Image (spheres, rainbow, N blue to C red):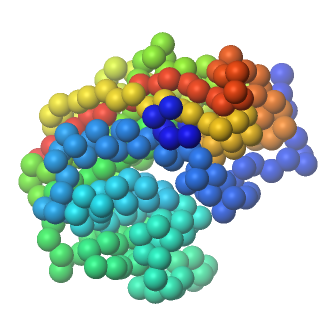
Amino acid sequence: MTPMLVQHHPHPASAPPAADGPGRARDWAEIQERMLVPLYEAVYQHLEVGTRTRLLGLGCGSGLALLMAAARGAQVTGVDTDQPRMDLARERLLPDSGAGSGGGSTAAGIEVGAHRHGGTRLLYGRPAEAGDATRPAYNLITAFQPIGGCAVDDEEDADSLAAALSAAVPMAERGSAVVLAGWGPPERCATSAVLRVAGRLTERLHTAKSWQPALRDDLEEVAGRAGLRPDGSGRVACPFGYADMDSAVRGLMSTGLFDAAVAAADQATVEKEVIEALHPHVRPDGTVWMANVFRYLVARTP
């Protein structure tokens, strides 16, 4: 299936999904990430990404968006703090690189550094890791993780994203494009009903992250905090299509949007609630299909 067809108390015996980082990262890469292909393609087409593009992907994850840009001839650099997803990005973009090539290590043994192949670099760490005075400045920065799916209405999360963008801006040419993405209006996102499961299960944990619908100006607000100037936006249909219920549950759980719900209840309870919420979207052939609209904002560096 193509992407155009993705009162409770903590249970002492349950572990959050992050405990199986590699497994969840692979579910993201093999099931869920492809649902955002129409978004990536629309942005790249709008900005005419090609051989003159020097792209910095913030939160690049398992690297599908970078791979698509590289296929257009772009020189790509990706940075992320999710090691399991970065391992998969190396498999995709740097298949011949060794596990420890090109990188340093911290005292804790966590790899921090770059993996290079031609014009491609993958870095584990914060945006500041992407600076390289020996290379031309970037002329495109992307932050594709959708706003509205990670409670960026929370001030701490909004500040974190704005800080990441602020750290990346000095590495880009003046007037370079910076792309942010967000969920569309809830009434146009069938998946919103499923994601609200997380909110119901964490309603008593007022400080916990859970899914919230994106507001009309969320993207502009975060861009403004980073000192960026909005310069256009667009909407893209990104339907979530799954081969069966198991794939749907695994894909959605891989997003991390249900982690707080698992902490508030337990894995089995959350999965049961997700399955119930998905039932209206099951087709006669057993596939699961949900229409969604995502929005992207193009801003410019000062």
* Residue name at image x 45 percent, y 34 percent: 4
Residue furthest front in the image: 285
In which image quadrant can residue 113 be found?
Answer: bottom left
Q: Is residue 153 visible?
A: no
> Percent position (x, y) of residue 272?
81, 30
In which image quadrant can residue 256 be found?
Answer: top right
> Percent position (x, y) of residue 295?
34, 29
The quarter in which the N terminus is drawn is top right
> Percent position (x, y) of residue 211?
57, 29
> Percent position (x, y) of residue 45?
22, 43
Q: Determine whether 221 is above or below 21 in the image.
A: above
- In the image, taking residue 249 as reference, residue 139 lies left or right, namely left
Q: Determine whether 138 is above or below 45 in the image.
A: below
* Residue name at image x 47 percent, y 67 percent: 92
Residue furthest left in the image: 174
Q: Determine whether 80 is above or below 272 in the image.
A: below
- In the image, taking residue 222 as reference, residue 261 lies left or right, namely right
* Residue name at image x 65 percent, y 38 percent: 243
Residue furthest top in the image: 187
In front here: 275 or 210? 275
Residue furthest right in the image: 13
* Residue name at image x 83 percent, y 22 percent: 7
